[in-house]
Amino acid sequence: MSAEPKVSVHPSPASLAAAVAARLITRLVDVQSERGTATVVLTGGSIATAALEAVVASPAHTAVDWATVHFWWGDERFLPADDPDRNAVQARSALLDRVAVDPTKIHEFGSTDDFPDEDAAAEDYAARLAAAADEERTDDDTTAQDPRLPRFDVLLLGVGPDAHVASLFPELGGIRVKGATTVGVADAPKPPPRRVSLTLEAITSAQEVWLSVSGSDKAGAVGLALAGAGHVQVPAAGARGQLKTLWLIDQDAAQKLPGRLIEHDDEHED
């Protein structure tokens, strides 16, 4: 089962980033109140980075016990560990180096410093995901979860103009992968070509999937994804959470949406 998409439209990229931040803080607090810990899957891109910066800027961020939050990534560029184009480097600068996280709960994809190729990095990440799932089941019976994956409370995604999510691009091998949680990508049409990504199976295991999209160049991708296009041609169409699928977009990205899909923003929506 997966949740049908809901759409929330915001007037500007800045207001969109602030809304994502407010929702994330609220969701992490709620999950921690229920379970004692929480897990978020981060993404890259300008809106994602702005949202993480907005988290730190919000006085409410102190309500989160950051030391008990696990951080994973939906994808990564296969580059040296300190390359500024890596999603993890950007996330550290925007958030992780600015709040009291537990370094052992930050789970980055391996880099060219660690592995000979993207396939080896993908295999390593899959093994670490599986180990985290095993540990989680020991501490907290989550038998309903995919045994290969820990519980993902919130999984954040951006969407490209071609409707790619994570590093799963239209028609290419990554979006077609079944039976695996990670994939190495050697031929991404967006540079750099070498990447590592969660598969669609892993993405759709998340409790909640949030897609944050800004800009008129993304409007076509948003429209196609929400019109029910196939996920091989429009990967964003397949990105759905088990309990919630939330599209957080700005006015420019909403230009090709039918009005019936649009809801007014409500930061306290369950």
Image: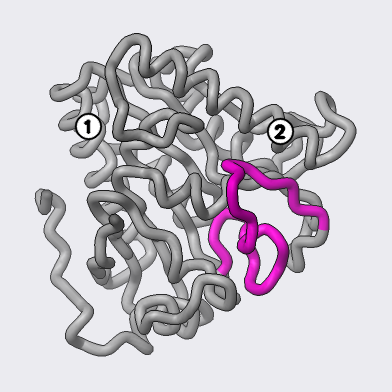
- Residue drawn 62% across the image and 62% down it: 175
Residue extent of the magenta highlight? 164-186
Q: Decide whether residue 1 is among the magenta residues.
A: no
Quadrant of the image for the N terminus? bottom left
> Crowding at label 1, few (<14), some or many (≥20) Cα neighbours within 10 Å?
few
Residue 123: mark: 2
- Label 2–label 1 contact, CB within 8 A: no
Estimate the x, y position of residue 62 in percent, counting from the top left. 24, 23
22 or 226: nearer the viewer: 226
Estimate the x, y position of residue 103 in percent, counting from the top left. 52, 14
Amino acid identity at mark 2 = Glu
- Residue drawn 30% across the image and 57% down it: 2
Report whether residue 236 is seen.
yes
Estimate the x, y position of residue 84 in percent, counting from the top left. 70, 40
Q: Secondary structure at mark 1?
A: helix
220 or 99: nearer the viewer: 220
Residue 59: mark: 1
Q: Secondary structure at mark 2?
A: helix
